[in-house]
Image (cartoon, rainbow, N blue to C red):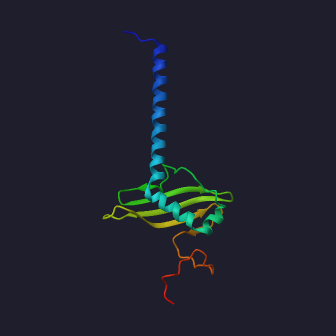
Amino acid sequence: MRVSTSKLQQMAIYTTLLTGAGCGTMYYLLQKNFSRSDYHRLALEQLKANQTAMDSLGAPPLKVHNIHLSDRHNRVEPYTAEIKIPVTGSKDGGYLYTSSVRDPQTLGWNLTQAVLQLREGQRIDLLTFTPPSNKTEGLETGSWSS
């Protein structure tokens, strides 16, 4: 049985297209899985809550980019997650380096490290305590004793 060259070419083209579509779908699903995870969400919430970091980026608007899947800083295991999230604002951009651990009893994730490294070299630790300003707007003091 002899197969024509044109049939073999068509089969090679279809196989290449299907393989490419499969790889693209897997990449999309992995990125979607990362962005919906609790350790990713907690890190971004911490970033958005830090006004100094947001001002340094020039955010809002804050643009969160896809994680580089081949980057050695991105590791997710059953009870630990370390990811490097690329972020940009209107003034600057950088990477949000995060580390989270999973509580074995509740299976919830806890953020243990969140550091924003800007392109300009500035590092902002998002988990350190920043002293409050003198503004009391939005501060609930009803249950505090004098």
In this view, which residue lies farthest toward the bottom?
146
Q: Nearer the viewer, residue 63 or 73?
A: 63
For the N terminus, which image quadrant? top left
Q: Nearer the viewer, residue 62 or 11?
A: 62
Picture mark count = 0
In this view, which residue lies farthest toward the left?
105
Residue 4: image location, x then y, percent: 45, 11
In this view, which residue lies farthest toward the front?
142
Residue 123: image location, x then y, percent: 59, 68
Residue 13: image location, x then y, percent: 49, 23
Does 54 sit above or below residue 37?
below
Q: Residue at x 48, y 49 (%)?
A: 70
Q: Nearer the viewer, residue 13 or 116?
A: 116
Q: Residue at x 40, y 10 (%)?
A: 2
Does 29 sit above or below residue 105?
above
Does 33 sit above or below residue 10?
below
Q: Nearer the viewer, residue 5 or 32?
A: 32
| Residue 104, quarter of picture | bottom left
Q: Classify residue 116 as left or right of residue 104.
A: right
Residue 28: image location, x then y, percent: 49, 42
Q: Residue at x 39, y 61 (%)?
A: 80
In this view, which residue lies farthest toward the top?
1
